[in-house]
Structures are given as structure tokens and as C-alpha cells.
Amino acid sequence: MEELPLLLEQILWSGPHPLRPTAFTKYRKSLDQLEITSSFASSNHQNMNKRMLGILRSIHDSKNTKRVVVEDDRSYRHMMNERFRRHRQKESYLALHSILPSRTKVDKSSIAKTAAAHIRETREIRDELMKKNWEIREKMLEIEGDKAEEMTRMNIGVKSPRAIESLVVVLKCLKGLELKARAVRSEFSQEGFSAVLDIQSKIEDSIVEKAMASALTEVDKNFQSDFQ
């Protein structure tokens, strides 16, 4: 029942309701404060933009700087390599000049021409020496082959006044058998002649002796037929 008068009072009350006292007050910014805050936010936003632009510009500048540094480093290395190459080339020409005739000029063209002529001359000398060396080698092989063949010593005695003719027949017989007489020691007399022959032979001694005996017998028969 006590609440009814209060309710009627609230309904019939036309003015603003009285506020209850409280320790808290509503915070409201003034117009000046709002303007200051807005201007500060705007300036802060501009500063952020400037800072971002500065950062982007510094990144771009750093890339360009790195590119320039890389190009400068590449140019420097190329320059040093070229300088080192020329230095080695100069040393090579000087070393080549030291083995050429003393009258050779020091310029690169003269050194190259003189060296080329010297190389051609050296090749010709080399080819000639190789040719002579080959010929000497062939002769040595031939001599060694001849030495490797068996040497046969044969004693010949002919009782015939035609001693010279008999010796000629013996030599022709050896030639027909493709044999070589390395040494011939002979003695002539009125009764005939005797000879010692060192023969280089590839065939058996008996065959050689048989051929020579047959040839001498033929000479003796011819002598007897002429005498009769």
C-alpha cells in the first residue's frame, strides 16, 4: 500500500526526475578537446605515412646501393683479372724472347714471327734427323741379322793350273746360292791353289760343299777336255 503513492507520484510527475546522488560523473569532452584530439590524430596519421614512405624509400635506395656495389665489385674484379692476364702475357713473351737470337726485337710481333720461323726450322731439322736415324736403324738391323747368320769356314784345294778360273767359279757358285764370302785367304802355285773361305750361310754346310765340289769338278773336266 505504501508503494502505491510512490507509483502515482512517478506517473503524475511532469518535471524531470530527481537524480540520486552518486560518486561517479559522466565524462564529456569539450569541443576544444575534441578538435585537439582530432588534429593530433590527423598529424599522427600523417607522420605514420611519412615514416612508411621513408622506410620504402630507404629500402629502394638500399637496393640501388647494393646494385651499384655489386656492379662496382664486378668491374673491379674484371679490371684485376685483365691486369693479371696482361702481366702473365708479358712474362711469357719475355721468357720466349730470352731463348731467341739476341738480335730479335722486344715487341710482341717480332717475338712471335721469330719464334714461328725458329719452330719451322727446328721441325725440319727434327724430320731430317728422324730420317737418318731410321736409315741407321735399318742398317744396324741388317748387320745384326747378318751376324746372327751362321759363319762357315771352308777349305778348298784344287790341283789345277787354272787357279784363277777355279776361284772365279767358286765365287760364282756362292753368288748362285745367295751366300756371302766374308773373308777369302788363298795361295796360288804351279800345281794349283788352296783357299780358306769364311761364308755367311743360311743353309747346311754339306749343301754348300757339294755345290762347290760340283763346280770345281766341272772346271777340271773342261781343263782336261781342252788339254786333250
Image (cartoon, rainbow, N blue to C red):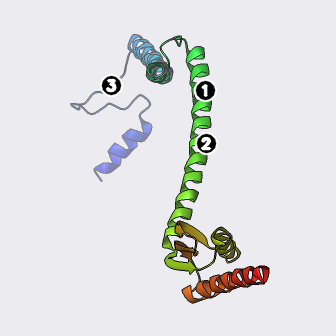
Res 55 visible? no
**Which amino acid, by three-letter code, is at mark 1?**
Ala
Q: Is residue 185 above or below residue 133?
A: below
The mark that comes first in sequence, 2 or 3, is 3
Mark pair 2, 3: CA separation: 116 Å
How far across and how far down the image is residue 136, in percent?
55, 52
Residue 31 position by quadrant = top left
- The residue at 78%/84% (across/down) is 228
Mark on residue 96? none
The mark that comes first in sequence, 1 or 2, is 1
Q: Are marks 1 and 2 in contact (CB under 8 Å)?
A: no
Choose mark 1 or mark 2, whichever is in front.
2
Please name the residue that numbered disc 1 is placed on: 116
Instruction: Look at the numbered disc 3 and give the secondary structure of its residue.
Output: loop
Instruction: Look at the numbered disc 2 and give the secondary structure of its residue.
Output: helix
Mark on residue 127? 2
Horizontally, is 169 left or right of 158 in the view?
Answer: right
Mark pair 1, 2: CA separation: 17 Å
Horizontally, is 225 left or right of 58 in the view?
Answer: right
Please name the residue that numbered disc 3 is placed on: 27
- The residue at 23%/32% (across/down) is 22
Q: Residues within 10 Å of mark 1 (few under 14, many from 20)?
A: few
The mark that comes first in sequence, 1 or 3, is 3
Horizontally, is 178 left or right of 80 in the view?
Answer: right
- The residue at 60%/15% (across/down) is 109
